Amino acid sequence: MEMRPPGWDDPVEARIRELNDAIDTLRELAARDFKSLSTYEVLSMRYLVIQLVEAAAAICLHIMGELGERPAGYPDCFARMGAKGLLPRALASRLAMAARLRNLLVHRYWEIDDQRVHRSVREGLKDFEDFKACVRELLRHGHRP
């Protein structure tokens, strides 16, 4: 029988692992000057932002679904977590903006200012670390979805 670490099959823990992976790589890209990034690294950055937001949004949707809520989309999900006091409102607002950036990357990629995305990554990675900490705190206090 295969041994798996605790939480391996937990959907929230699986998404947290995805968050960690995306954050680690994005941190490396964001630490560099934008002009030094290759085209492939810039495109990787776009993809990783999408992955990061989708992992966080999957956690958000899972939690809100367990509470009987049906958010209209990723930005709305974060906003509702803030409104319910599950996230600080300012953090929820910044995560909703990140979700809108994800939507832009997915649906209107031809309008992307990659330098601006790079700057957003530099400034916004901490928000995802804070989100992860809030989720862990919710789970620790028995708000287990």
Image (tube, rainbow, N blue to C red):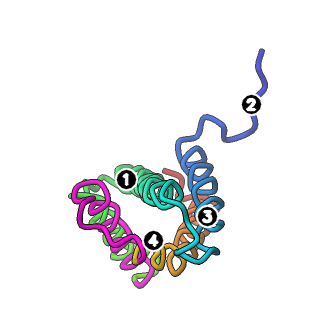
Image height of 65 relative to 114, above or below: above
The residue carrying mark 1 is 61
**Which residue carries the number 2 mark?**
4
- Amino acid tagged 3: His
Q: CA distance from mark 3 to mark 1?
A: 19 Å
Q: Is residue 63 visible?
A: no
Residue 86 numbered mark, or none: 4
Q: Nearer the viewer, mark 3 or mark 4?
A: 4
Rendered view: 122 above or below 80: below
Q: Where is residue 10 drawn, in percent x and y?
A: 58, 40
Mark 3 or mark 1, whichever is nearer to me:
1
* Upstream in sequence: badge 4 or badge 2: 2
In the rendered image, residue 143, in percent from the top left (x then y), is placed at: 53, 59
Q: Residue at x 66, y 37 (%)?
A: 8
Find the distance from the CA under tag 2 to the CA under tag 1. 25 Å
Residue type of the residue flagged with mark 4: Leu
